[in-house]
Amino acid sequence: MDHKVNSGPTVNGKKQKNFIPDRLRRVRLALGYSVIEFADRIGVSRQALSQFEIGRTNPGYDTLQRIEELTRYPVAYFFMPMENTVEGPFLFRAQSSASKRMKEIPRFVISEMQDIYNYLDGFMDFAKVNVPNELEFSVYSDIEEIEDITLRIRRHWGLGLGPISNITRLLEQNGFLVSKLSNHIEKIDACSQWRNGRPYLFAGSNEISASRLRFNVAHEAGHSFLHNERDLEIENEKSKEFHNLLEKQAHRFASSLLMPRETFLDEMYSTSFSHLIEMKRRWGVSIAAIIYRCHDLGILTDGRYEMLIRQVRKYGKNEPLDLEIEQESPNSFRQAFELLVEHGVKTRDDILRELPFPSDRLETLAGLEPGFFTEKTDTTNVVFLRPQK
């Protein structure tokens, strides 16, 4: 018999009374289960699961335990209140063969990032969002206008026209929240969304090269700057041509921000492959991205462009320098959790109780070392400093 649950667990020091149906639905979709598959795995009917997900009935104690066992999300997670959210368009980079179900995974990652931010925001100040006002870009604008927009952003942030040493840190310093995962999401590269006035970026995984990750970050920043009208998401889902247009614009934004036209042209005095490798070392972007940039700026003929692309593809998964350039890591969430623990504001157990994620999932999203929340440390002093005379 599945015993009725009269109230939920304690989250953030408060007894939670209400099961949150949308959390169950989001976890199911993110794990790739259909209603029928998930219902079968937790031992209920399809109709019963549908009732849980629309909030008409609540799962009983035994069912909640099976949900936790299947999903690895603690029972408390499904009782954690969800903040009302004003959302911008959810935009992502994905292979054309990515299914609708696959696209729910990065959407779930962004919602998890928001949960983490909402929790940490109760204890500390994050960098304020600092972006230029009124960039006045329409999706139907001339793509060349993006060159001027990225220059304006560089001026706003006090940058020159040289390489950006760490694009992830730069965005975090200006109020963006950035995260990545340890494992690649099949057919999904990255995604972004404004939520309650703050831009969230999921940059990809530790499995891709450092230069590709940097470009992912800049590409998603492009969506955040250029494509923030809510109705763009609807058109993006309906039309492949419109999706390709947005992607082309975000790609130009990333190229222009990371490789500003004036300086890049001055330094691009040769299109030999050896010089392309040196340009990659200096600018921190892939050789393929440098070749695309050269083509956009009219440096390469179509024939030379295609020949260089074929040359790059011969290297397969790893271009030259891919194993030498260190990958950037987001820091905001990691630093916040470390500060909470180091200053005794919260213990690791407190955090997992109040922010009930699977511990390894929370570590990955926050960029923490594996085992951060599960390692046991004895902080009881057995020796003491002697007062100095």
Image (cartoon, grey):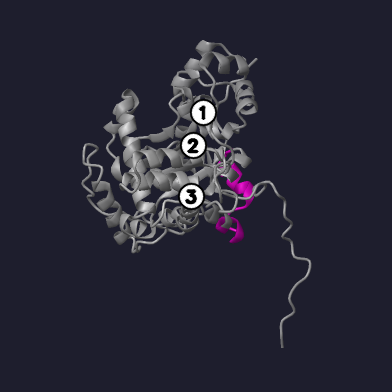
Q: Say what amino acid the circle numbered 2 marks.
A: Val
Confirm whether the magenta stretch covers residue 349: yes
Identify the mark nearer the N-term, 1 or 2. Answer: 1
Residue 59, above or below 312: above
From the viewer's side, name the closer residue of 246 and 375.
246
Q: Which residue is mark 3?
A: 273
**CB atoms of marks 1 and 2 within 8 Å:** yes
Q: Say what amino acid the circle numbered 3 marks.
A: Phe
Tell me which segment is drawn in magenta: 339-357
Q: Secondary structure at mark 1?
A: helix
From the viewer's side, name the closer residue of 97 and 198.
97
From the viewer's side, name the closer residue of 148 and 304.
304
Confirm whether the magenta stretch covers residue 192: no
* 202 displayed left or right of 303: right
Question: Is disc 1 surrounded by few (<14), some (14 to 19) or many (20+) residues within 10 Å?
Answer: some
The Cα–Cα distance between marks 1 and 3, rounded to whole angstroms, is 42 Å
Foreground mark, 3 or 2? 3
Q: Is residue 87 among the parts visible in the rendering?
A: no
Q: What residue is shown at x 44% (from left), y 23% (from top)?
A: 100
Q: Which residue is mark 1?
A: 30
Q: What residue is shown at x 44% (from left), y 48% (from top)?
A: 177
Q: Which residue is mark 2?
A: 109
Residue 157: horizontal and vertical position, in percent?
A: 34, 60
Residue 47, above or below 362: above
